[in-house]
Amino acid sequence: MKPAVQVQKTAQNIVLPDLNVNKRTKVLALLKKDWQLYSLLVLPIIYLLVFKYLPMLGNIIAFRRFIPGGSIFGEEWVGLQYIQMFINDPTFWHVFKNTLMISSLTLLFCFPAPIIFALLLNELTSKKFKKFVQTVSYLPHFLSMVIIAGMVLQITAGNGPINALITALGGEPIYFMQEASWFRGIYVTSEMWQGMGWGAILYLAALTNIDESLYEAAKIDGANRWKQTIHITIPGILPTIVTLLVLNIGSLMAVGFEKVLLLYNPLNYETADVISTYLYRIGLESSNFSYATAIGLFEALIGLTLVLSANAISRKLTDSSLW
């Protein structure tokens, strides 16, 4: 019995290493070694904290009555009063419908465009021509939104180039921006033109990571370029496609505020007015900040739900997801 007792006492005296201490030591050593690289994160983190996370505290005024000049967190608790207001507001549901329509059309047409464009660029054999096409396609992304809106208004004007062509062919001029039925098509087309080249950059980068030996093996098996694209290229960039699709679905309700604000007018409010422009008029022009915050919070919850749902569906169907 004595040896057993001695073994037990010896086991009790053994001090196990603290894994948390080891981890902290490794992290501190890593920070000390590459502190220059980690210091680059300071400004982005400060930016996120100041402009993204701290403003979330202001969501409390969706449940409190805010009076300009009073407390930044509201004067008195009103509960779900403002939420009930926009639920019973027919104008809100009209702009909600417009937002859903425009964002769905944008996702349907603008999301596949960079993918198709990147696949077409990948087939070009002339490097000079490929660089030229890429440079030209990137330029619209760097133009100011005011310039883009001005170009759209000039092109679609009554005496613009489109109507000049229609008139030359014997037709009657169409006043595009004065007719509500044209707004969605014009908006989606301008979004596609502006973002297609820039959006293709990520897909072109993903294409460079595909193993060339797969294409060589496919050629030996007699696969043409179309079959290679279907069975090698698209599966190779599928994780990138899924990631960007989830992110785009998450921002489905966030239709571009600047472009809509610059393009719409009272004549096309019926199809052009979206949640962001409605919030601008209600919150800033009418100073109804609590009501606007309640609508914005509702919009954010919808975006969060869409991201979580899209990510779960993607993980189940394709084994690719954000997390």
Image (cartoon, rainbow, N blue to C red):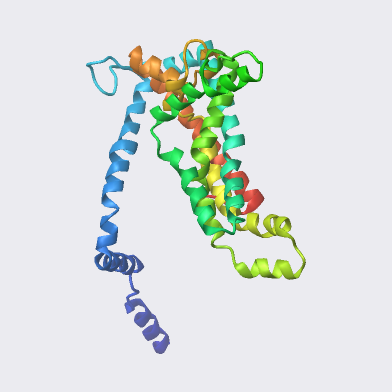
Question: Can you give x and y, in whole percent of width and height, for residue 91 in the image?
Answer: 51, 12
Question: Can you give x and y, in whole percent of width and height, for residue 195 in the image?
Answer: 50, 39
Q: Residue furthest bottom?
A: 3
Tell me: residue 65, above or below residue 319: above
User: In the drawing, does residue 6 fall left or right of residue 310?
Assistant: left
Residue 84 vs residue 46, the one in the foreground: 46
**Which residue does the image show at 56% across and 44% down from the upper left?**
114
Q: Residue furthest left?
A: 69
Question: Can you give x and y, in whole percent of width and height, for residue 19 in the image?
Answer: 35, 68
Q: Quadrant of residue 52?
A: top left
Q: Residue furthest right?
A: 222
Q: How many marks?
A: 0
Quarter that holds the N terminus: bottom left
User: In the drawing, does residue 318 fall left or right of residue 199?
Assistant: right
Tell me: residue 179, above or below residue 162: above
Question: Can you give x and y, in whole percent of width and height, for residue 66 in the image?
Answer: 31, 17
**Which residue does the image show at 39% across and 27% down from the upper left?**
146
Tell me: residue 165, above or below residue 236: above
Residue 31 visible in the picture: yes
Tell me: residue 176, above or below residue 10: above
**Which residue does the image show at 66% across and 66% down from the upper left?**
215
Q: Quadrant of residue 278?
A: top left
Q: Quadrant of residue 231?
A: bottom right
**Which residue does the image show at 47% across and 18% down from the upper left?**
264
Residue 305 visible in the picture: no
